[in-house]
Image (cartoon, grey):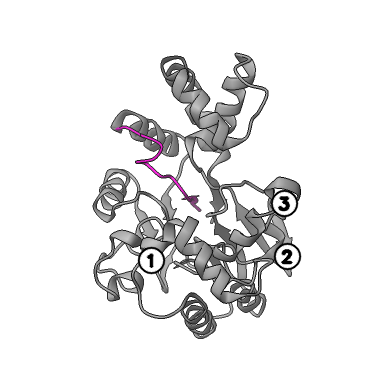
Amino acid sequence: MGKLAIISDLHVDINHLNDKELAMLRNFCLEQGITRLHFAGDIANKVDRALAVVDFFDCAIPTTFHWGNHEMPDIQQENDFENFKDNRFLNFTTVDLSENTVLVGINGWYDYQFSDLKDEKEIKRLKNLFWYDRMIDRKGTDPEISTAICEKLQVFLASIPIQKQVILSTHFVPKPEFIVHQSGKYARWNHLNAFLGSPDFGRVIDRFSNVSDVVFGHTHRRFKKQKINGTYYHCRPFGYYYEWQLSREFVKENQLSEVLEPTKLRGVLRRHDKEFLHYRKVHLLEEVQKGMTILDY
């Protein structure tokens, strides 16, 4: 028996996580009895920085990873998106966790189906205007890339013996139950749901009864575990520092703002940087627990 921990959206650079904080996180994993660690994308904005983080943890705990969208603008060769040459890179690859359980990693992608917009030209315009992924240079349209990944997923899962329990890690959203639909002045965010994932990915998973758990992030929203068509789905991304629960608690406890919207909190936290850094140090491990999925195997 062992314990698998999966962390998505660590964003070490945006969150300014230093070596001392990473060591705190690593020690916490060891204290929790974690025997395998996997990063489900968006470790950092630069590939070298992401690999350095994997190295940092791998020296104490066997560690694997796959990409999220934030590493991808730094990828220079088309082959490195899906076939990066590192034996810890887990994309359409399995790791035996036990005699009966395997961990599967898949980057994933999106195909615009989660958007309330149907005009693909308008979706592309919004991507080039607002979305971080506009800097990613890879072959094919987003729906074409997503379709190819879903087709490959079907073949790949079919190759795993049915008696093997599969824990699947991906970065992007596979089910509509994890898409938030806004109203009022925030309704425009419903357009950007285009870039969150693909329901086709989830439909492929539905065909395989031995997929016990699916872990993903990208949403920067945390959801309760849900059982859908016999599979448990876990979405607990670590996210940006100004989205953390501890950041909201810091603002509320110090009565710094009545508005707890993340984009507004960023400025509040910067203006009270010294006090926030102390608060963050005290409560960071609590946030880590909220932003980590732990599964026994």
Asked whether residue 68 is drawn in magenta, I would say: no
Q: Is mark 3 on a helix, strand or loop?
A: loop
Residue 182, label in figure: 3
Mark 1 in CB contact with mark 2 (< 8 angstroms): no
Amino acid type, label 1: Leu
**Secondary structure of residue under mark 2:** strand
Q: Residue 184: x and y, percent?
A: 75, 48
Q: Of the residues shown, which amino acid type is indicated by label 3?
A: Gln
Residue at the spot 35% in from the left edge and 57% down from the top edge: 71
Name the residue rendered at 35%, 47% in the picture.
61
In front of the other: 208 or 136: 136
State the image quarter where residue 133 is shown.
bottom left
User: Is there any visible trace of residue 273 in the rendered image?
Assistant: yes
Residue at 66 percent across and 69 percent down: it is: 117
- Mark 2 sits on what residue? 228
Q: Residue 66, how many percent across, how many down?
A: 39, 61
Residue 72 on image: x %, y %: 35, 62
Local packing at callout 2 (Cα closer than 10 Å; few below 14, some 14-19, many 20+) is: few
Left or right of 99? Residue 91 is: left
Identify the residue position indicated by label 1 in the image.
Answer: 90
